Image (cartoon, rainbow, N blue to C red):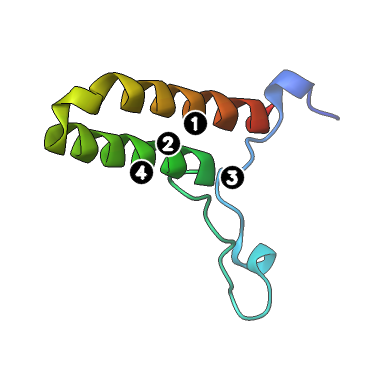
Amino acid sequence: MRARPDQAEPRPLLPTKSARGVRGAVPPREALLSTRALLIVLVAIGAAALTAMAPEAAIPIGVGVGVVTLLAQIVKD
């Protein structure tokens, strides 16, 4: 007698050891930060350092950071 789909045996959440291959290699994990996110963070840190050294240049630096962020978003799309 067949079991109904809602009464089927539960599947294990983790793959079995045989699914890993001969040497037991683990598939690579995804990076915590994408290259785009890392670029935006580095530009923001650089802008903060420049603004701390030259407060009169804060507005042009802010505009530059905005442009870089916008270009990174365009490249993503």
Cα separation between marks 2 and 3:
40 Å
* Residue situated furthest front in the rendering: 56
Specify the amino acid type for callout 2. Ile
Q: Which mark is residue 42?
A: 4
Q: Are the residues flagged by discs 2 and 1 in contact, CB closer than 8 Å?
A: yes
The residue sitting at 56% across, 60% down in the picture is 28
Specify the amino acid type for callout 3. Pro
The residue tagged with tag 4: helix, strand or loop?
Answer: helix
Q: Say which residue label 1 marks.
A: 68
Q: Residue 51 carries which label?
A: none
Q: In which quarter of the image is residue 73?
A: top right
For the N terminus, the quadrant is top right
The residue tagged with tag 3: helix, strand or loop?
Answer: loop
Residue 8: x and y in percent read: 71, 29
Front-most of residues 32 and 46:
46
Cα separation between marks 3 and 4:
42 Å
Across the whole image, how many numbered discs are drawn on residues? Answer: 4
Q: Residue 40 carries which label?
A: 2
